[in-house]
Image (spheres, rainbow, N blue to C red):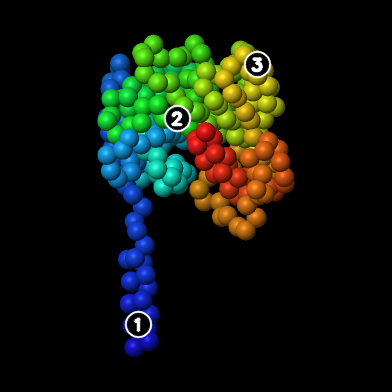
């Protein structure tokens, strides 16, 4: 009897937990075909602030999941804050797999992925539920590198629609941009771990420092002790989530990727709320 009551209690408890929202597949016109994307949208008519989220070199989804846990975790977090989130699938749309260890990539961050960003923005400008002056960008690794190209003054759209409100780049490869004298036309935040041995924290620091005085606001936060991919969704969070001043560059000793992930969540929320 006690076992039966326990099972019933656990069943009721599980059923009371709301299921995570499922993304809606959408198709976005491209000059060379169709860009497939996944959309998380709050209930109601809007207009909603919207974030275009750009996956890394591993792609957007897996065999059985259209959105990998890292991106789903961020999308759900942004959704709870009242944002719509559009995740374009740059690789799946072109019928190619992950590009992390491909010597000759078929989709370039500075070319095809910038075109995907432009197409996503153009599609969003036509949606009645979008707050057209509150469309931002967020990207990871290769997606963050594409973001850096997309926010350069030379990449500005020629239409009269509002520009991106903000941009957030998680551990991009800054080496080419730093050498080219990168600058941005929209407020841009770079987030990277001090122990990142894939991207280059010094190159990102050089890139951001070099943009001061000749571009829109650019800022970098370097998380001590954090590695590449520090924000992946399967890192357990614990009580030590950083100080109240966690948004300050190189402030405090986070010690683990989990702590840097928690601090980055605060930094993202503050940057988008500007």
- Residue furthest bottom as drawn: 1
Tell me the crowding category of disc 3: few under 14, some 14 to 19, or many 20 or more residues within 10 angstroms, Cα based: few
Q: Is residue 67 above or below residue 151?
A: below
Residue at left offset 51%, top offset 13%: 153
Residue at left offset 54%, top offset 31%: 169
- Which residue is denoted by mark 2 in the rendering? 136
Specify the quadrant of the image occupied by residue 198. Answer: top right
- Which residue is denoted by mark 1 in the rendering? 5
Which is in the foreground here, disc 1 or disc 3?
3
- Which residue is denoted by mark 3 in the rendering? 213
Which is in the foreground here, disc 1 or disc 2?
2
- In this view of the protein, which residue sits in the foreground, 164 or 27? 164
Q: CA distance from mark 1 to mark 2?
A: 49 Å
Q: Is residue 89 above or below residue 252?
A: above
Mark 1 element type: helix
Mark 2 element type: strand
Residue at left offset 36%, top offset 18%: 161
Which is in the foreground here, disc 2 or disc 3?
3
- In this rendering, position of residue 172 left or right of residue 67: right
Q: Position of residue 93 (x, y in %)?
A: 33, 28
Q: Position of residue 9 (x, y in %)?
A: 36, 76
Q: CA distance from mark 1 to mark 3?
A: 67 Å
Can residue 184 be seen by looking at this rendering?
A: yes
């Amino acid at each position: 009897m006690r076992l039966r009551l326990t099972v019933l209690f656990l069943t009721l408890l599980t059923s009371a937990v709301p299921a995570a929202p499922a993304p809606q597949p959408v198709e976005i016109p491209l000059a060379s075909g169709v860009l497939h994307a996944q959309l998380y949208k709050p209930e109601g008519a809007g207009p909603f602030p919207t974030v275009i989220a750009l996956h890394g070199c591993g792609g957007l989804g897996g065999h059985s999941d259209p959105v990998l846990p890292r991106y789903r975790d961020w999308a759900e977090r942004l959704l709870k804050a009242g944002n719509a989130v559009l995740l374009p699938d740059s690789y799946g749309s072109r019928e190619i797999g992950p590009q992390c260890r491909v010597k000759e990539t078929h989709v370039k961050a500075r070319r095809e992925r910038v075109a995907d960003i432009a197409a996503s923005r153009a599609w969003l400008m036509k949606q009645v539920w979008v707050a057209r002056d509150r469309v931002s960008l967020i990207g990871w690794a290769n997606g963050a590198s594409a973001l850096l190209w997309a926010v350069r003054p030379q990449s500005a759209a020629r239409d009269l629609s509002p520009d991106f409100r903000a941009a957030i780049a998680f551990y991009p490869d800054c080496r080419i941009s730093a050498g080219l004298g990168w600058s941005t036309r929209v407020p841009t935040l770079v987030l990277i771990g001090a122990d990142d041995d894939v991207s280059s924290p010094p190159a990102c620091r050089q890139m951001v420092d070099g943009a001061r005085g000749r571009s829109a606001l650019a800022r970098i936060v370097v998380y001590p002790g954090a590695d590449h991919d520090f924000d992946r969704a399967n890192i357990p969070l614990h009580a030590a989530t950083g100080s109240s001043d966690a948004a300050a560059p190189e402030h405090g000793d986070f010690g683990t990727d989990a702590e840097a992930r928690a601090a980055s969540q605060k930094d993202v929320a503050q940057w988008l709320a500007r």
